[in-house]
Image (cartoon, rainbow, N blue to C red):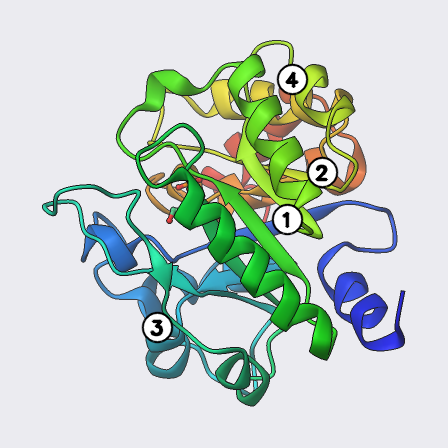
């Protein structure tokens, strides 16, 4: 691996082989979604606990201070919205020159396997990888399911993740599912887990993140279940403990409760 690529990968995946990415890119198709209405305010208390932030160029410029920033994964696909015809019909929204100008550590793009736009999204990924490799910029592929959340099973996610890796993604972001080892074992590049919509209890999140790590994920790219939680700092600290300190779900819950009640900073 060339020095630039290796250096950028090391900014993302920490020396323990693990990572906690914090995505705040949801507005690119969801608009001002709940608790991300003002990205700067959402980010301010929690950014220090993230290893990298996944964000579009618009929110990066407007809401992230360049002198306090964490490594950036730039969301470079889009062009669709929640109210449009098909979320899968994305294009590349941001050039590699812009990514370089913004000094990012990686770029991220969604693929929509099985959709009417499967081919376009996979060719977009391939083109982005060609451009990124020229400049030593890793591509994170996001195995998107659009509104069809029920698609999140091992067979489908293993298929998407493997295809993303075959086309050159350096990191694959997918969803946790039952039998998650089928996904990680079939994917020759590091896999990180997204959270999906906000779930009922913190423990559910701790349990799936812990299970996914045991089954081969290197970390998370987890947004709504952090910043839509009433106690986002407690949540991100507890997740950090699972990812970087091998905490159990029960220990993570204790950290969450203790930070929430003010007993621990
Ligand atoms: C949507 C994304 C998000 O980065 C990804 O889904 C992770 O966020 P969450 O944990 O909220 O699902 O790709 O734009």
Kindly state the secondary structure of the residue where label 4 is placed: loop
Residue 102, percent from left and from top: 53, 84
Could you tell me residue 127's position as x and y percent?
Answer: 55, 63
Contact? badges 1 and 3 (CB < 8 Å): no
Q: Is residue 221 above or below residue 31?
A: above
Q: Is residue 175 visible?
A: yes
For marks 2 and 3, give the one nearer the viewer.
3
Closer to us: 60 or 41 = 60
Q: Are marks 1 and 2 in contact (CB under 8 Å)?
A: yes
Mark seen at residue 180: 4
Mark in the foreground, 3 or 4 = 4
Q: Which one is earlier in the sequence, the residue at label 4 or at label 2?
A: 4
**CA separation in Å, label 4 and label 2:** 16 Å
Question: Is label 4 in contact with label 2 (beta carbons under 8 Å)?
Answer: no
Residue 243's disc is: 2
Q: Which residue is mark 3?
A: 59
The residues tagged by marks 4 and 1 sit, at their Cα atoms, a distance apart of 18 Å
Question: Which of pointers 4 and 2 indicates the residue nearer the eye?
Answer: 4
- Crowding around mark 2 (Cα neighbors within 10 Å: few <14, some 14 to 19, many 20+) is many
- The answer to which of marks 1 and 3 sits earlier in the sequence is 1
Please tell me which residue is depicted at 87% across the width and 47% down the height of the picture.
16
Q: Which residue is mark 1?
A: 20
Mark 1 secondary-structure assignment: strand
Residue at disc 2, secondary structure: helix
Which residue is found at the position 87% from the left and 55% from the top? 15
């Amino acid at each position: 691996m060339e020095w630039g690529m290796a250096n950028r990968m090391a900014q993302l995946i920490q020396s323990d082989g693990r990572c906690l990415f914090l995505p705040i890119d949801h507005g690119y198709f969801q608009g001002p979604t709940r608790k991300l209405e003002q990205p700067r305010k959402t980010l301010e208390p929690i950014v220090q606990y993230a290893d990298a932030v996944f964000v579009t160029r618009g929110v990066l410029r407007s809401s992230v201070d360049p002198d306090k920033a964490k490594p950036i994964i730039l969301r470079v696909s889009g062009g669709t919205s929640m109210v449009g015809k098909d979320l899968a019909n994305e294009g590349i929204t941001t050039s590699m020159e812009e990514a370089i100008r913004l000094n990012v550590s990686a770029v991220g793009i969604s693929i929509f396997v099985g959709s009417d736009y499967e081919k376009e999204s996979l060719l977009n990924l391939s083109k982005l990888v060609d451009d990124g490799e020229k400049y030593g910029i890793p591509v994170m592929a996001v195995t998107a399911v659009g509104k069809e959340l029920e698609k999140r099973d091992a067979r489908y996610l293993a298929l998407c993740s493997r295809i993303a890796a075959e086309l050159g993604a350096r990191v694959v972001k997918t969803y946790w599912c039952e039998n998650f080892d089928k996904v990680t074992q079939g994917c020759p590049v590091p896999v990180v887990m997204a959270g999906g919509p906000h779930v009922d209890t913190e423990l559910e999140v701790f349990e799936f993140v812990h299970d996914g790590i045991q089954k081969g994920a290197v970390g998370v790219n987890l947004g709504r279940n952090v910043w839509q939680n009433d106690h986002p700092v407690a949540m991100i600290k507890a997740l950090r403990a699972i990812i970087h300190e091998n905490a159990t779900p029960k220990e993570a819950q204790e950290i969450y409760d203790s930070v929430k009640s003010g007993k621990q900073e």
